[in-house]
Amino acid sequence: MNTRIIARTVGLVIRIEAALLLLPAVVGMLYGEHETLYFLLTAVLALGLSILLTLKKPVSTVFYARDGLLIVALSWVAMSALGALPFFLSGEIPSFVDSFFETVSGFTTTGSSILTDVESLSRGMLFWRSFTHWIGGMGILVFALAVLPAAKGESRAMHILRAEMPGPSIDKLVPKVRTTALILYAVYFVMTVVEIVLLVLGGMDLFDSVVNSFGTAGTGGFSVRAESIGAYHSPYAEWVIGIFMLLFGINFNLYYLILLGKVGSALKSQELRWYLIIVALSTGAIALNTAHLFENAGDIIRAAFFQVSSIITTTGYASLNYDGWPAFSKMIIVFLTALGACAGSTGGGLKVSRLVMLVKAIGQEARSMIHPRAVKHIKFEGRPVSRETLDGVMVFFSAYVFLLLGSMLVVAFDGFDLVSTSTAVLTCVGNVGPGLGMVGPAGNFSEFSVLSKLVLSFDMLAGRLELFPMFILFAPGAWKRS
């Protein structure tokens, strides 16, 4: 373990967070709110901590994969703890554990909330709460790779990029990792701006358009209204947000191909086809199952599509309280909660690519039982899938299940009903936001114990960082000096 490189990189990430905290401070000033002081105070504390962590320059430049994992895990924990301070110091969320839970939920783009009256928060706090979605969606370390000269070391940067970006594999779009990060953020920024403009053109005020676009882009789901997107009673806004949620759930590498004019290559993506087919089938099935709850076909399709788009992309916005839907539709919601979006997107969950490979692996195993001597390889995106990749998918799936079961056992000590307990854990690990029962679209996580909130906070971080960066924090071997 290269302690100085780890400390220095975490310090640089915290310095970026200190700068980003100035944005909600400006918003608070524009609205004449005294809470601005707490953003400035937190920024100063973050800057001071950053200076302390970056005082000593690394003696050795040797950098291992485990160092990348530790940097990512420690950076996310640190920026969540610091990001919670404005909520706590201002008294708008009096408990630090609750403030930490809310901030972790923001940065991990989960959208689970302990707030019972979100509309009582100041504008600056609401902006920061949603802005954490936008920061965490693409990843603050990806941003660091894009803008910091210290992040130019290619092998070092690639370890960080692989540890933070969601999906079973991450490849550079171009030879330099820093350029890859710049491309990713450029696409991310432009798509966010386009959504803001479309929402404003539809009659939504600028502040709400910005924060709702932050939640959509990061596939986070924090809303500034208690009734989420349903509070606007705007079919136009639901269609715009629903479509953009779907777009942000697509692998960003495909957008780069489109920019290069390789539209055909992008459309041939196997994961994209599965993703769109699952969305279409789920929307159709829910529409048929809930048709009796609506007055016309337009409302049926819009409601089904919005909820499917929101859940599969792990955004968590709601246009209505789907907790009242029939059991069949709710089971589809649970399936989509576990599944998640595409690899390389801002969405969480298991990822569609892993589902495709798991299904193909099962099919291959069945064929080998029928034809033991046949030699066949699994192909994904037109290329053979290596045994190493398949093993990685299997291990990830197993770890995912163990994390779910272990967390459910701990959270069950709170004594809540099975549906609420199980979907609370599932939605946090999957970075979705709302579950069912007491944590449904009309509920929140405020009633859970301190222990459960800490476990669920860990689950959100583990889910966003693909499990292992958080697991490695508890591995004694990871902390040994090289």
Image: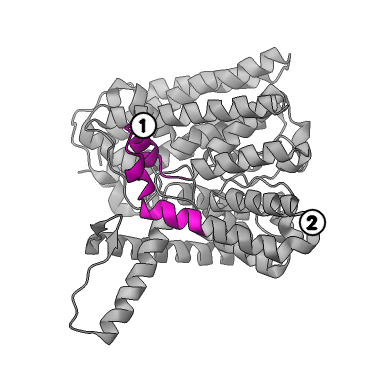
The answer to which image quadrant residue 210 occupies is: top right
Pointer 2 with pointer 1, Cβ within 8 A: no
Read off the magenta span: 250-277
| Residue at 21% across, 33% down | 175
Front-lying residue, 226 or 291:
291
Q: Quadrant of the C terminus?
A: top left
Sequence order check: which comes first, mark 2 or mark 1?
Answer: 1
The residue carrying pointer 1 sits among few (fewer than 14), some (14 to 19) or many (20 or more) residues within 10 Å by Cα, namely few
Where residue 216 appears, x then y in whole percent?
Answer: 58, 38
| Residue at 53% across, 33% down | 134
Front-lying residue, 457 or 109:
109
Identify whether 470 is placed above or below 85. below
Where residue 98 appears, x then y in whole percent?
Answer: 65, 42
Q: Is residue 34 left or right of residue 252?
A: right
Q: Which mark is residue 441?
A: none
What residue is pinned by disc 2?
294
Front-lying residue, 310 or 477:
310
Q: Is residue 441 left or right of residue 463?
A: right
What residue is pinned by disc 1?
259
User: Is residue 435 highlighted in magenta?
Assistant: no
Q: CA distance from mark 2 to mark 1?
A: 40 Å
Q: Is residue 450 left or right of residue 299?
A: left
Identify whether 464 is placed above or below 128. below
- Residue 420 can be seen, yes or no: no
